[in-house]
Image (tube, rainbow, N blue to C red):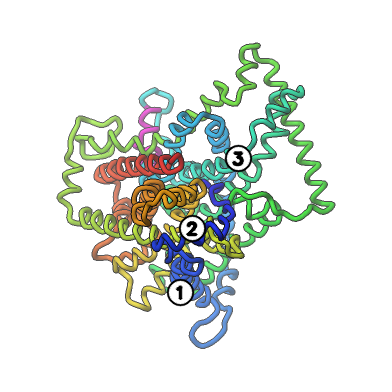
Amino acid sequence: MNHSALTAQPPHPAAAAAPTARRQPWRAWLQPGAKGAPLVVLLIVMLVYPVGQLLLLSVHNGHGFTLIEYKRLFASPVYVDVLLITLKVSLWTTFFSVLTGYPIAYLISSLTRERKNRLLFWVLLSFWTSFLVRTFAWVVLLGRNGVINKILLGLGIIDQPLSLLYNFSSVIVGMVHALMPLAVLTMLSVMENIDRRLPSAAATLGARPGTVFWKVYFPLSLPGVAAGALMVFVTAIGFFITPTLLGGRHQTMITQLIIDQVMQALNWGFAGAISVLLLAVVLVVFLVYDRMVGLSTMTGGSSTARKPGRAGQWSRQLGDAVLTCLGNVTDALISVLPRRRKRAAGDGESLVLRAVVILLLVFLSAPASLMIPLSFDAGSGLAWPPHGFSLQWYQQIVDSPLWMQALTRSMLVGVGTGILSMLIGTPAAFLLVRGGMRGKAAMLAFVLAPIVVPRMIIAVGVFYFFAKIGLVGSSLGLVLAHTTVAVPYVVITMMAVLRNYDTRLDQAAHSMGARPWATLRRVTFPILGAGLMSSFLFAFATSFDELTIALFTSGGVSTTLPKQFWDEITMQISPVIAAVSTCLFVFIAALIWVADRLRRRSLTS
């Protein structure tokens, strides 16, 4: 997900566009008014209205205006403690995700295209691999009879199993593992646009390597760091999968309270009040981010932050002093290295950096990969090392009507979501890149709203809305809800493709006598087709892995694959889940490999 690709280009002159539009009837439906209308209608109906209804329930109990739910929310210290725990987990997750993700993004941005694509594939694979698969892997790794305890016992390091699960540390490890790829991709979009000649110029003028990095490169990458921290924090604060499976009662997140109020107590008003509190925290964070950095940096634009006052200037001087100190410390450490190591330390692709990045990529990929050998275990439990080889757990999946129905429904809903997202998101991408409309920044913010608003709030609002119109449990309802959260990825992908699409190719084909259909078939589709297929696959993957919305709206008769996975993992730990995890991991790996190949093909066409 390259946020720098969201920077719109100026439209071509009207004199050149007018004859093109007349000779290309297929573009008639892409007029400015029609381009964004389907997406705007979708977001109003499936995002603004449901979320607004949910928030309204918190202050209206059917008899009039009331604040009783908010009084209840702040009357008990339990709910305040849960909010503080949520903030604590989210902040630590953000810190470690950015800290560990920065070296990966830094190295990838400095490599040649071929080597960059190889490392980026593993980041994308981790980004799109199911949260359920990755979290279940940590359950197997950290359990009392898990892999880590078995290895430590086998080596004689410990005498009895350690309690590695159901504590704050396990939650942070799982959360960082889940959200580090998001931080990497967000920071990478900024780092790729940094002019590498600037650090080189500083080194030419005599600056030492540590000073070059901390005083030149790092300040240029700060917008990416801030954007990555923002995206990770907003995602973490609405997370519930990892805290539920890896944490104990002292690590309860605020989204878990919302689930309990809706699924068990059916208290919509109190669930709405908690949602308002969660949304208020997110909005405050966005306002602070906008004031300090500027929201335009999230899309690769320049900072629009206000001119700092006296306090801001003091903070900037303090920050400059800290960076100077870090540069001096780094240079002092480099100076004690042998001469050969010094030359390596001055290179952006040093051996130390590469070793750190490889270890971090292993951290991202190894847990889910661990499911593969466990799924072929001939034993009756998840034991390490596996005993024998057997396909019995895969046979159980095939023989189970629950798993097969869930798989079929997820495939159908995923395909429907991919097609609908592509049909709605592609015209909006045309509008944002090629259109001459005013207020593109506001339109872009509206398009990205499903990513910004915590998924749990969207899920509960859609559930309440569907309950009123009878769409709970229907595949149509799932397709509409999943399209709402998937369409921003389609817009982002297609905007990246359109920025590299030269419309003069169409005009050249016309000047050579090609008819509109021939131009469309031989010029336009070969260039945009790979991007369209890539956007479809990303939307499909988003739907295929979606749990939060499915948890409420999929129904109890025929559920989706993530919902079935969730039901199984919350009841028992079985090798069947390892087999399902392996299938999901391999499927998503193949899907992302194809999507990445298509994306690169579209960008180089």
Does residue 197 appear anywhere in the picture? yes
Q: Describe residue 304's horizontal placement relative to residue 143 as left or right.
A: right
The residue carrying mark 1 is 268
Residue type pointed to by label 1: Trp
- Vertical comparison of 247 with 479: above or below: above
**C-alpha separation, residue under disc 2 versus residue under disc 1:** 39 Å
In the rendered structure, which segment of residues is drawn in magenta? 138-153
Q: x, y percentage for residue 306?
A: 75, 55
Q: Describe residue 21's horizontal placement relative to residue 587 as left or right.
A: right
| Rendered image: mark on residue 332 | none
Residue type pointed to by label 3: Asn
Q: Are marks 3 and 2 in contact (CB under 8 Å)?
A: no
424 or 280: which is nearer to us? 424
Picture quadrant of residue 30: bottom left
Residue type pointed to by label 2: Phe
Labels 2, 1: front one: 2
Mark 3 or mark 1, which has the lower sequence index? Answer: 3
Q: Secondary structure at mark 1?
A: helix
Mark 1 crowdedness (10 Å alpha carbons): few <14, some 14-19, many ≥20: many
Which residue appears at 35% of the width and 48% of the height? 522
Q: x, y percentage for residue 223?
A: 64, 45
Q: x, y percentage for residue 179?
A: 49, 45
On whether residue 13 falls in the magenta region, the answer is no
The residue carrying mark 2 is 430
Picture quadrant of residue 348: top right
The residue carrying mark 3 is 193
**Would you say the magenta stretch is mainly helix, strand or loop?**
helix
Which residue appears at 68% of the width and 27% of the height? 200
Mark 2 crowdedness (10 Å alpha carbons): few <14, some 14-19, many ≥20: many
